[in-house]
Image (cartoon, rainbow, N blue to C red):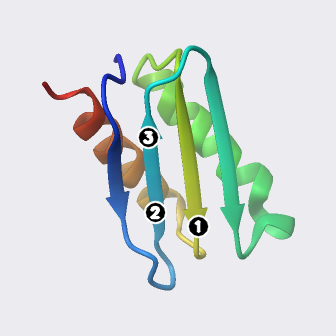
Amino acid sequence: MEIIKKGVAGTMQSSDLMVFVEPADTLRLEIESTVIKQFGHLIRAKADEVLAKNGVTAGFIRLTDRGALDYAIEARIETALQRASAA
């Protein structure tokens, strides 16, 4: 999946996250989370999994997490990617 424009999904409510996606020459993932010390490695692993599953090799992806569960992380990233790849 090629990221051709900016895409956003999610909310800043508790137990949710915002995902910001935009075009870039390389793949860069930035995570900000209220639970980064406890769960940062799991958030990154889920994000990496979703990006790989969707064939994303380039783009700037920023996650602002407020304690979202893994299924929410996956859904929000996929939605932002779809919005960023649609013409």
> Dot 1, how many residues are within 10 Å of its Cα: few (below 14), some (14-19), or many (20+)?
many
Among all residues in the image, which is located at the extreme left? 87
Label drawn at residue 27: none
> Dot 2, how many residues are within 10 Å of its Cα: few (below 14), some (14-19), or many (20+)?
many
Marks 3/2: CA distance? 10 Å
Return the residue at label 3: 21
Q: Give the total of numbered labels.
A: 3
The image shows residue 37, relative to residue 29, as above or below, that is: below
Label drawn at residue 18: 2
How far across and how far down the image is residue 69, in percent? 53, 67
Which of the two discs, 2 and 1, labels the residue nearer the N terminus?
A: 2
Horizontal arrangement in the rendering, residue 5 relative to residue 50 (left or right): left
Q: Residue at x 43, y 35 (%)?
A: 22
Horizontal arrangement in the rendering, residue 52 relative to residue 31 (left or right): left
Horizontal arrangement in the rendering, residue 16 relative to residue 6 (left or right): right
Image marks 2 and 1: residues in contact by CB distance under 8 Å: no
Location of the C terminus (image quadrant): top left
The image shows residue 28, relative to residue 61, as above or below, that is: above
Return the residue at label 1: 65
